[in-house]
Amino acid sequence: MRKDRSLSLDQRLFLKVYNLIWFLALPCLYGCKRIRSNFSRRVWFSDLDGQRDVDVWIQAASGGEAHIANEIMQNWPLNTPTTILVTTNTEQGLETLQETEPPEHIVRRLEICPFDAPCFMNKALRHYNPKLVVLLETELWPGLLSECRLKNIPIVLVNGRLQTRNMARYLAFPRFMAQIKPEQVFAVSQEDALRFNHVLGTESAEVMPNIKFDRCNWSAPIPYVHNPISGLMKAQSQFVVFGSVRKEEEDIVLQSVIRILHKRPRAIIGIFPRHVERVYAWRQSLEATRLTWNLRSKLEKKAHQGTVILWDQFGELEYAYALARSVFVGGTMAPLGGQNFLEPLAQGVIPCIGPYWQNFQWVGQEIVQQGLVQQVSHLDDLVEAMLENVKNPANRDKIHTKFQKYVQTHQGGTKFVIQRLLPYLQKSRS
């Protein structure tokens, strides 16, 4: 029996207002350089060359979700040829999708996602006529959800994440969200599942393995003799790396460097600003201290003990992690979401991070509990932890093996998702 897809009067009124808000916002959105280059594609004013039916529409907001979409397509079963439309909201997402060619049994179409105005989503759905829409992570767009509901197109949300701070805007319209909720929600943790249940007025959200773990397949740590930057220091040097340091935590890092060198005057410190434009500010800060320092680009021989190396050449952070005894990963001592602390782990080094790592909460708190990551809360803790790692570095091969085992026990999300999506296509084709 066909489900009742009608919306109540107040819900239809909400969509009319929501549609109007998008139109009123278009001039402001056009003023944004990041959006303007693909503006006609986002509003779907451009002529469309006839209907182009697809089996599945996957919405991947940006680069992280685009990697997940690629993972799904790369593992799509060979006996199920499928046409897949993948949309994204950003140029980074589009570039990420274009980096990986789909398998031969997948016909892939790429497009910038329309703005969520119901009229734009209506046009997109009529043009592509998908049998199934797949949302990744936190893509609860009212316009898309409501238009899919009215057209009887099932929606499945996979790899779902929903942070507490993002719940308020959905909870403002609980009845409406309950009416247009996806057919199924698969969240990456029990906590995320409970949040989706609360927002959508359901109890059916299930927990699944995070697909991002399926992409974690690092090789063995880079040995010293094969490391491209090993000429900068002797083997077994007391090398300390501050990686991907953000502007907001520069003072903490500078104080840490000073205190570490006071306790360990033979150490060599590598500072890697996250953004190249911060190199000048770091030069000024280091000049104001009594520290001995060099720019990486000016270093023509092995660094002396007690030297700070300010990295102004990018693309060498992985090699530095492979040489380091002690590592701090930035973006974590201020509420910035955190940078990638899995990279030093892949090189067999236990990283220190601050309390702010929301961007990588999907890895799970267990990684701290198992001793693979050291979480610190303030400057004193950070200095103490990094000094201990310099003095007693963990066995690199053992840490890498333990990390690989951790990843392997959390893999399987891609297979899980595909098994849940295929019945929808089989049903529509039959």
Image (spheres, rainbow, N blue to C red):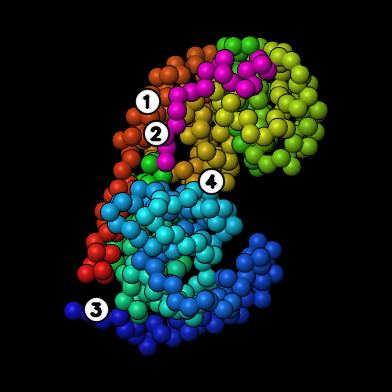
Please give the label number shown on residue 402.
1
- Residue 3's tag is 3
Q: Is residue 355 visible?
A: yes
Name the residue that disc number 2 marks. Answer: 367
Disc 1 to disc 3, how far (Cα)?
49 Å
Q: Secondary structure at mark 4?
A: loop
Q: Are marks 1 and 4 in contact (CB under 8 Å)?
A: no
Pair 2/1: label in front:
1
Residue neighbourhood size for the residue with mark 3, other residues' Cα within 10 Å, grouped as few (<14), some (14–19), many (≥20): few
Which region of the structure is painted magenta?
215-233
Q: Amino acid at mark 1?
A: Lys
User: Where in the figure is residue 219, as x and y percent of width and height?
Assistant: 45, 28
Q: Is residue 43 left or right of residue 128?
A: right
Q: Is residue 111 left or right of residue 36?
A: left
**The quarter of the displayed image where residue 46 is located:** bottom right
| Residue sitting nearer the eye, 425 or 240 | 425
Q: Secondary structure at mark 1?
A: helix
Closer-to-camera residue (272/314): 314
Lower sequence index among marks 1 and 3: 3
Query: Which label lies toward us, 2 or 3?
Result: 3
Query: Mark 4, residues whose alpha carbon is within 10 Å: few (<14), some, or many (≥20)?
Result: some
Dot 2 lies on which element?
helix
Of tags 4 and 3, which is closer to the observer? Answer: 3
